[in-house]
């Protein structure tokens, strides 16, 4: 699988994102195909089932968790997020920040998976490998 992924034009770009191994990259490439199918990172997140859905009834409006989307694609981002919090300091910082905001483990992991959709879409759109930017801390 690793050799086939490396032979794909997008394989090295996708694998540059921490947490995206050969198997997850292969599943992503098989399900998504061409990234240009999606007009934006939000469209890709909606296809994954990681974008919040607006629910409304009368005057009440709220965002709820999506129940649709491609299960395999959602699993790719969820598993890569889980791997990334163990190996990548930027992803771990994002996860810890969400936990400090009061989110449970599952909620923080889904938020990280959604963030990774944005990052991977930008990697493929710009044709640039992942480069971790250091977190800026504001001193009050």
Image: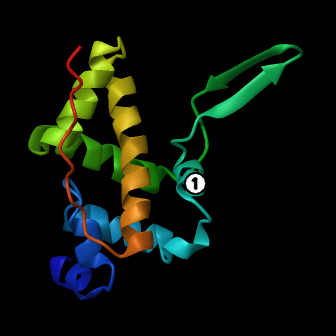
Is residue 90 toward the left or the right of residue 116 in the image? left
- Helix, strand or loop status at disc 1: helix
The quarter of the image holding the N terminus is: bottom left
The vertical placement of 112 against 119, above or below, is above
Q: Label 1 neighbourhood size at 10 Å, few (<14), some (14-19), many (20+)?
A: some
Tell me where residue 114 appears, x and y as whole percent: 43, 42
Direction left: furthest residue: 87
How are the residues colored? Answer: rainbow
Residue 78 lies, in percent from the top left, at 34, 44
Q: Label 1 belongs to which residue?
A: 47
Q: How many marks?
A: 1
Instruction: Spot the residue most to the right.
Output: 58
Image quadrant containing the C terminus: top left
Residue drawn at x 33%, y 79% as measured from the top left: 10
Residue at (86, 13) in percent of width and height: 59
Q: Residue at x 21, y 49 (%)?
A: 133
Q: Residue at x 27, y 32 (%)?
A: 94
Q: Position of residue 91 (x, y in %)?
A: 22, 40
Above or below, comparing residue 9 to residue 19 in the picture: below
- Compared with 86, 24 (above or below) is below
Question: Farthest residue toward the front?
Answer: 140
Write down the quadrant of residue 12 in the picture: bottom left
Q: Where on the picture, by quarter, is residue 83?
A: top left
Looking at the image, which is closer to me, 44 or 100?
100
């Amino acid at each position: 699988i690793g050799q086939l992924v490396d032979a794909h034009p997008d394989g090295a770009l996708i694998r540059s994102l921490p947490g995206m191994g050969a198997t997850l990259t292969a599943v992503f490439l098989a399900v998504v195909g061409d990234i240009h199918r999606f007009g934006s990172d939000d469209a890709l997140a909606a296809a994954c089932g990681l974008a919040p859905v607006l629910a409304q009834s009368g005057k009440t409006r709220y965002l709820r968790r999506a129940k649709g989307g491609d299960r395999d694609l959602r699993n790719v981002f969820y598993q890569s997020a889980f791997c990334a919090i163990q190996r990548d300091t930027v992803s771990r910082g994002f996860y810890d920040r969400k936990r400090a905001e009061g989110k449970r483990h599952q909620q923080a992991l889904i938020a990280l998976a959604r963030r990774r959709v944005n990052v991977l879409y930008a990697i493929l759109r710009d044709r640039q490998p992942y480069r971790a930017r250091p977190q800026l801390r504001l001193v009050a």
